[in-house]
């Protein structure tokens, strides 16, 4: 039986469970929270709480990764825009969601 990987969506953010961290990552040392997406239209940031058992890493292209041995929360600065969600223990790749624009026939990043 295969283990299905979990995926969480929070606004334009996509948080995908992965098997292991890639090589050659730089550890991030954010103190209280880390911005995982900045809103381009309404000034709303998506953030993850930093606490003991939650580590963040970044690759050379700016892709963000998280390894957490304790659940942590994804939230917005404007709480009415999106519900806070809990991310369980795991290893995660964090990125912006994409969608296909049929008019321009291009893949574009989702904007919030």
Image (cartoon, helix red, strand yellow):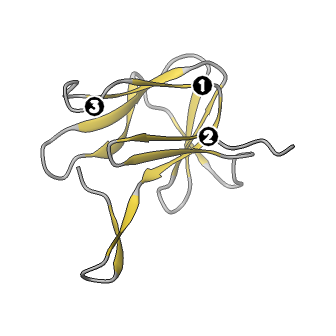
> Closer to the camera, 70 or 33?
70
Asked if residue 76 is positioned above or below residue 10 in the image, the reply reads: above
Q: Which residue corresponds to the image point at 36% horizontal and 32% vertical from the top-left?
A: 47
Asked if residue 103 is positioned above or below residue 79 in the image, the reply reads: below
Which image quarter: residue 103? bottom left
Mark 1 or mark 3: whose residue is earlier in sequence: 3
Residue 88's mark?
Answer: 1
User: In the figure, is residue 16 to the left or right of 74?
Assistant: right
Residue 45's mark?
Answer: none
User: In the figure, is residue 37 to the left or right of 56?
Assistant: left
Give residue 25's position: percent from left, percent from top: 62, 50
Residue 82's mark?
Answer: 3
Q: Residues within 10 Å of mark 2 (few under 14, many from 20)?
A: few
Asked if residue 8 is positioned above or below residue 72 in the image, the reply reads: below
> Closer to the camera, 99 or 43?
99
Q: Which structural element holds mark 1?
A: loop
Q: Which structural element holds mark 2?
A: loop
Q: Which residue corresponds to the image point at 74% horizontal and 45% vertical from the top-left?
A: 20
Marks 1 and 3 sit apart, C-alpha to C-alpha, by 18 Å
Mark 3 or mark 2: whose residue is earlier in sequence: 2
Q: Which residue corresponds to the image point at 15% horizontal and 41% vertical from the top-left?
A: 43
Q: Which structural element holds mark 3?
A: loop
Mark 1 or mark 2: whose residue is earlier in sequence: 2
Give residue 91's position: percent from left, percent from top: 65, 38
Q: Which residue corresponds to the image point at 32% horizontal and 36% vertical from the top-left?
A: 46
Which image quarter: residue 54? top right
Asked if residue 76 is positioned above or below residue 16 in the image, the reply reads: above
Which residue of the protein is positioned furthest toward the right in this rendering? 1
Residue 6's mark?
Answer: 2
Give residue 79's position: percent from left, percent from top: 22, 24
Marks 3 and 2 sit apart, C-alpha to C-alpha, by 19 Å
Q: Are marks 1 and 2 in contact (CB under 8 Å)?
A: yes
């Amino acid at each position: 039986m295969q283990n299905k990987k979990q995926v969480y969506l929070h606004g334009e953010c996509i948080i995908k469970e992965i098997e292991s961290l890639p090589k050659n990552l730089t550890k991030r040392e954010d103190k209280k929270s880390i911005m995982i997406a900045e809103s381009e239209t309404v000034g709303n940031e998506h953030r993850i709480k930093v606490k003991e058992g939650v580590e963040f890493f970044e690759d050379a292209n700016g892709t963000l990764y998280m390894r957490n041995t304790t659940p942590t929360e994804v939230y917005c600065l404007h709480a009415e825009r999106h519900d806070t969600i809990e991310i369980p223990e795991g290893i995660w790749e964090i990125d912006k969601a994409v969608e296909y624009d049929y008019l321009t026939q291009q893949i574009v990043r989702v904007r919030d």
